[in-house]
Image: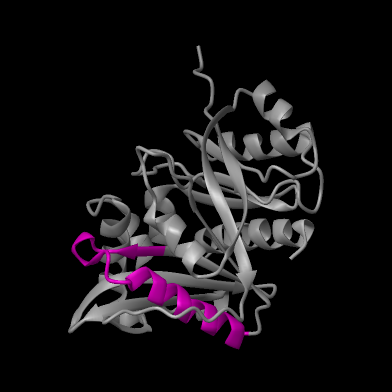
Amino acid sequence: MDPRTGLRVAELGEAEFMYQMFATADESSRMALGLAQARVGGGEITVMANDPTGGFWSRAIGLGVDAPVTGDVLDDALEFARDHHATSVIFQIAPAADGEWERLLDERGAVASSSWVKFAGPATLTPAVNCDLRIDVVGPDHADEFAHVMCVGFGMPLDSPLPAWFRGLPGQAEAGFTTYGEWDGDRLVAAATLFVANGIGTLAGAATLPEYRGRGAQGALMTRRMLDAAEAGCEWVTSETGAETPDSPNPSLHNMRRMGLHELYHRRNWIWRPRPQH
């Protein structure tokens, strides 16, 4: 995969996933969470005004791939964020994106923060994984369990509107989503999502209950999603996870490497917050 192809696959796959996850939300979740989404500068911006996590979900992704990042593009994104009452926005722009975007973000008050690592590979990868849990597609009948595992696995609050939003993902096949689960007997203990659009399979949102970690659940879910992405006609699969430090190891990073995905680049998060009004 040449660097430009990797950039397009990694950034635009994730950007479309985020856009559609917001766009397909039910009206109750849109109101409770303050959801809004827009396409800007060849990428997208999502806003969750009432984010129970404190800022994970409001993001701008895919800028600088099909069009340079300019001041006007950033100003359009920030105007949308302000209009929809964002308390922060994470600008996730690839290091090879076009435009002087670091300077432009700095001029608008954004601050560099932690990094994510972007991965991609051919959808024909078939890694061997040992796991004693049963994998299947999650349909609407198991939507409550799917939402519970996603929230607990990611440490997101159950006493918030997030579970109701996650419950809407199973059954969204027409929008490109397929949800998966792994069961220990009758108990759903791990969950994941595959999003397919424009020939790209995005391995998005995988979580395991704490007491079931270390049993190969995530590797098995990645393998199943790669196979299904290839079956759906995807040429590439892509994913991302947080960079690790000696004090904060990240097992997901090592899982992706073991699956045969290629580490493309580290992408710095830039966090913008509106200035207080006086």
Q: Position of 173 compared to 138: left or right?
A: right
Q: Is residue 12 magenta?
A: no
Q: Is residue 252 visible?
A: yes
Query: Foreground: 101 or 220?
Result: 220
| Drawn side of residue 58 relative to residue 67, left or right | left
Vertical placement of residue 8 versus 79, above or below: below
Left or right: residue 230 compared with residue 273: right
x then y, percent, for residue 80: 62, 40
Instruction: Decide which of 54, 93 is in the foreground and name it.
Output: 93
| Residue at (44, 80) in percent of width and height | 128
**Highlighted magenta segment, given as a residue range:** 206-232
**Residue found farthest to the top:** 278
Question: At which x and y percent is residue 55?
Answer: 43, 40
Quadrant that contains the N terminus = bottom right
Chosen colour scheme: one colour
* The magenta stretch spans residue 215: yes
Above or below residue 114? Residue 153 is: below
Across and down, in percent, residue 255 comes to: 43, 63
The overriding secondary structure of the stretch rendered in magenta is helix
> Vertically, is 175 above or below 20?
below
